[in-house]
Image: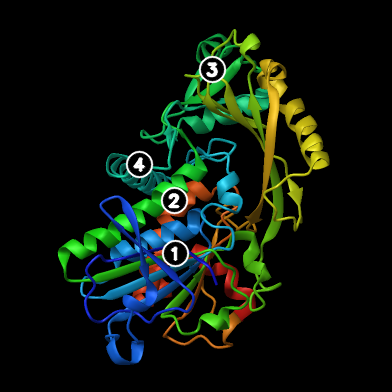
Amino acid sequence: MAEARTLRNPNPSPATFPARNASHRIVRKRGLFLPVSSSSSSRSSSSYAPQSSLRYAVLGAGFAGLSVAYHLLKHSPRDSRIRVDIYDEVGLGGGASGVSGGLVHPYSPKAKLLWRGKECWEECLELLRVAEEAAALDELSNKNHEIDGFIIRRRGILRPAMSMKNFDVLNENARNCLPSCRIERTSQDAARNLIPYFSTPCNAAFYLPEAVNINPQRYIQALFLACQNLVQEASGVGLEEKELHLHKSSINKLTDLAHYTAVIVCAGAQADSLPELSSKLPLRTCRGVVAHMRLPESARNGNIGESPSILSDAWLAVQNSSSLYMGATWDWNSRNYSRDVSADEASRALVELLSKASVIYPSIKDWTFSGAMGGVRAMPPLTANNGSLPLLGSIDNFVTGNGNEDIKFWLFGGLGSRGLLYHALLGKLTANAVLSCNEKLIPSELISWKKPYID
């Protein structure tokens, strides 16, 4: 088992967690990574581990997994000894999260506020702030700072009205928008002041000035830094000991992790590959391919470097004046989890995406294809009243066959294409439920998916 990164308190107390075989520890102190042998910094659990020791396994290093890990470390009891192990065979952001378009707002395609949209939006912005601060701190203290470029691009999002019927629906629902994420109606001429050569079939668009564009890979890296900072801060207080470990390895079955206090499955579409959960989760897989487009120097007669991103049948996530991502395709029931995209798949995706994007941004034809990446979304089922909602809650019944009060196995999955909006609030709810061993802390709408399997 390879362990990619490990962080402990620089000055641990004599009571520590059990060592793991063939591990390589890294102590992060004052911005530096210092190798330490695992045998010299660990003790056996039977002799030294206090009763308040808590060990949590988080499966998945995407938006969901990093949010849960952060909130476990943030909200753990002050007098506890806590260790969080994150398992992901690819590493940080290796799944669908790392391929996300990064466009975040709290509305449906019809501009309706989504389930708990205000809370989700506020918690998302808070976790984004935490990640940005962690990256800024790391840049000041670490000469080997690896996060280059923006984490959050604050230029808003523009959504064109594609028909008069679509315009009427968007216009009506926009009246109930949040003050913290406004929806403003704008004409095509005004929209072109925001995005050169923008086009809309109905001469109208809707601008969300507070909506943001996230670089998913940089954000995940920064959120991991924020988790590391919580461990560092705990060492300064002296009342608690925290450890954070990232294992670049896969888990074959959940019962292999029974020695943990709790196990939280945040593995996205690959949760179904665990034998205990196979064919038991009401999720559909959907592979999406995203194309990276670049604008040649000779074609730069319309600078979009300060422009908002575009959200329509295809979305355009602007990175800078000469770079954007265009997505995404929808290949239902795909089991191709590879981030790599074959030449044939890329060619088909490019044709499909260009045909959609050129309707609202004709100048996309001047851009050149620079590469593609793919990921598989875990799409949840529709609920009766709230659209599609992620799946949360205890899964002990699936793993052990019984639901004891002492819940060990948990699920946080099915974020679909709204992972960035939901991950912060639902990661916090999941972590609090895990720490309290109380599923009732999770809203009933998010655990109702289990009813057919339990009744």
Q: Which of marks 4 and 2 is nearer the N terminus?
A: 2
The C terminus lies in which quarter of the figure? bottom right
**Dot in front, 1 or 3:** 3
- Element on which disc 2 rests: loop
Q: Earlier in the sequence, mark 3 or mark 2?
A: 2
Within 10 angstroms of label 1, few (less than 14), some, or many (20 or more) residues?
A: few
- Element on which disc 3 rests: loop
Residues at marks 4 and 1 touching, judged by CB atoms closer than 8 Å: no
Q: Earlier in the sequence, mark 3 or mark 4?
A: 4
Amino acid marked by disc 1: Pro
**Which residue in the structure is indicated by mark 3?**
304
- Which residue is at the front of the view, 359 or 442? 359
Amino acid marked by disc 4: Glu
The CA distance from mark 3 to mark 2 is: 33 Å
Within 10 angstroms of label 3, few (less than 14), some, or many (20 or more) residues?
A: many
- Element on which disc 4 rests: helix
Q: Earlier in the sequence, mark 1 or mark 3?
A: 3
**Whether residue 14 is situated above or below residue 65 in the rendered picture:** below
Amino acid marked by disc 3: Ile
- The image position of residue 266, as x and y in percent, is 53, 63
Q: Is residue 201 visible?
A: no
The CA distance from mark 2 to mark 1 is: 11 Å
Q: Is residue 70 visible?
A: yes
**Which residue in the structure is indicated by mark 4?**
132
